[in-house]
Amino acid sequence: MSDADIRSESWWWLDIAGLDAIVAALTRAGHRVVGPQVADGAVVLRDLATPRDLPLGWLDEQDGGHYRLRQDAAAGVFDHVVGPHSLKNFLFPPRETIARFTRTDGSWTQQPTDETGPPLAVIGVRACDLEALRIQDRVFMGGDYVDPGYAARRERLFLVAVNCRRAVATCFCHSMGCGPAVTHSADLALTECTAAGGEPMFVCEVASQRGAAILAAAAIDGLVACSAEEIEAARGVPQDLARRMHERQAEPGQSRPRSLDTHGIRDLLFDNLEHPRWEQVATRCLSCTNCTLVCPTCFCASVTEVADLSGDHVARERQWQSCFTLDHARMHGQSVRNSTASRYRQWLTHKLAGWIDQFDSSGCTGCGRCITWCPVGIDITEEVAAIRASPKDGGGEQRP
């Protein structure tokens, strides 16, 4: 095998040592490498020194308002599903300084600001989060006004994606056409093909020229190309999961996976702005903002200016905001969405209906985080189904 053989659209076998060599190659290239790890009772994205820190032998149980980890000797490295973190945490950070100003002799000057940090490499990204990345790319880079910090981080982002072979009860990416197979945006794409209790093995698809360059730089001894039959078998792993999700087959110890009927969903929601279901869900909703914090596509933010004690140095900071807070809809000194019902309606209708007008796509990728991390287990698929079951004309195109 020569470096010339490693090219885009080639397929190779990797073991943990090979994955370790890729992490080392990324580190040598100056990347900050992060990947899924068990911490504080969840699988979260943290700085990754070695693939030995990945959650081998851990499974997650997820349902409405429920997240638990358990060990399973038969579980692979990536048999967990998505946790509370997504690419949004790194490309659109929760708090970011976007400008600095200094006053000298009574005059203000703007200082250079670089909050982008080193280039980022993320191991273990799933198909639903790659779709969320595509959506956020449109939000932050798709119009006339490009967010410079996001664009700088995005341009240098290296992605090692993983095809899912397991789903939990809150997954419904198949309904949104966003998974479970990786179809775009990755540099390398892994399919875990480990037999129960065996040493972790992966089929690695080289999905970009950058991916080919890193795999070549890893200089893995004895790298073996996949046969046509092995490639077909690897492709069949997420295809088999998609079939089981469409048939709503439950994983062991899990409830059946969700589904969401998206047919005519824009008009369904906009035509039912006065549906009694909004008030019903409001009796449970805590307006805690958990759903918007874990959502990989929510992008609302507020900007504040923070001065030092002298008053001569000011930082302009952007931080995540949520449409579930009163201040988010404050105009002319008061909030225009005073009720929990109006705020939940705004979130759901924008995510599943207004987003289509604004960005020509849904704002939901079916990752299910908003269901799992809602303290009272409010289920976006259940709310839409309830409105669809008994639609009531609410006045057409009027926005909440």
Image (spheres, rainbow, N blue to C red):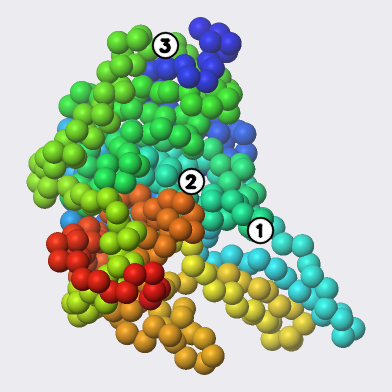
Q: Earlier in the sequence, mark 1 or mark 3?
A: 1
Q: Which residue is mark 2?
A: 134
Q: Which residue is mark 3?
A: 225
Give the Cα separation between the discs numbered 1 and 3: 44 Å
Q: Is residue 235 visible?
A: yes
Which amino acid lies under the numbered mark 2 shown in the image of this protein? Arg
Q: Quick check: marks 1 and 2 in contact, CB under 8 Å?
A: no
Give the Cα separation between the discs numbered 2 and 3: 30 Å
Q: Quick check: marks 1 and 3 in contact, CB under 8 Å?
A: no
Q: Nearer the viewer, mark 1 or mark 3?
A: 1
Q: Which residue is mark 1?
A: 145
Which amino acid lies under the numbered mark 3 shown in the image of this protein? Ala
Q: Residue at x 87, y 85 (%)?
A: 106
| Viewer-proximal residue among 19 and 141 | 141
Q: Is residue 25 above or below residue 10?
A: below
Q: Nearer the viewer, mark 2 or mark 3?
A: 2
Q: Residue at x 26, y 29 (%)?
A: 239
Q: Quick check: marks 2 and 3 in contact, CB under 8 Å?
A: no
Q: Secondary structure at mark 1?
A: loop
Which amino acid lies under the numbered mark 1 shown in the image of this protein? Tyr
Q: Secondary structure at mark 2?
A: helix
Q: Is residue 324 above or below residue 23?
A: below
Q: Is residue 114 left or right of residue 181?
A: right
| Viewer-proximal residue among 301 and 223 | 301
Disc 1 crowd, CA 10 A, few/some/many (<14, 14-19, 20+): few
Q: Secondary structure at mark 3?
A: strand
Toward the bottom, the furthest residue is: 333
